[in-house]
Amino acid sequence: MVRIVETSIEINAPAHSVWQVLTDFPAFQEWSRFILSVEGKPELGARLVLKMNDGGGVMTFKPLVVVCSQGREFGWRGTVGAGFVFAGEHRFILQESSRGVTRLIQREAFSGLVVPLLWKKLDTRTRGAFADFNLALKERVEAVTSHAKVR
């Protein structure tokens, strides 16, 4: 059984500006309270080391980048055990409108034997962490973009 948590937000900046902030992993510690740190490169097939806190404590895991489409989509897949116990495929999807506004969709598809047992936490705590991350990303991108325009 697959269960999905999805949130979205509109960011007043073009997709390439959102992409730059989203893939500037060393800067995450300055603005994100959900994804605390990312080690690795935003490249297809790369192994990342993520430290995250959705409100339940810091978790470290090592997912594999499964999609990296410059300026459009970035995502990874992480598993616990052989993957049949618990797996998550996380995606950031950028959809730019003709007026230069980008809709960020953050989605994770959870699967595995323990998902039904964890679903209430995933649907509330994780969904809230996604929404907080989206807002922090929006604020960061819009601040960086407006600062660049002032120059």
Image: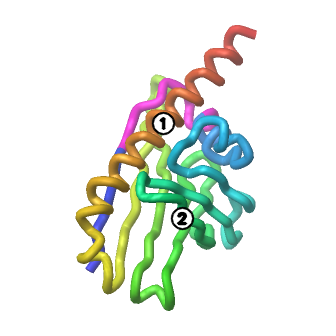
Q: Nearer the viewer, mark 1 or mark 2?
A: 2
Q: What color scheme is it?
A: rainbow
At x 50%, y 55%, the residue is: 53
Left or right of residue 149, residue 130 in this image: left
Count residues near mark 2 (Cα–Cα under 10 Å), then give few for <14, some for 14-19, many for 20+: few
Q: Which of these two is toward me, 72 or 22?
A: 22
Query: Which residue matches tag 2?
Result: 59
Residue 55 in picture, x, y percent from top left: 42, 52
Residue 44 position (above or below residue 106): below
State the SS at label 1.
Answer: strand
Q: Position of residue 114 (x, y in %)?
A: 32, 81
- The image quadrant where one finds the N terminus is bottom left
Residues in magenta, as a range: 8-17
Asked whether the beta carbons under mark 1 and mark 2 sit within 8 Å of each other, the answer is no
Taking the image as shown, residue 128 lies to the left or right of residue 27, namely: left
- Examine the rendered structure and indicate whether residue 13 appears above or below residue 87: above
- The kind of residue tagged 2 is Met
Residue 28 placed where, x, y %? Answer: 65, 43
Specify the label residue 96 is tagged with. 1
Three-letter amino acid code at disc 1? Glu
Foreground pick, 44 / 9:
9
Identified at 41% across, 48% down, the residue is 130
Work out how far the residue at label 1 is from the one at label 2, CA to CA, in angstroms: 32 Å
Q: For residue 146: magenta?
A: no
User: SS of the residue at dot 2?
Assistant: strand
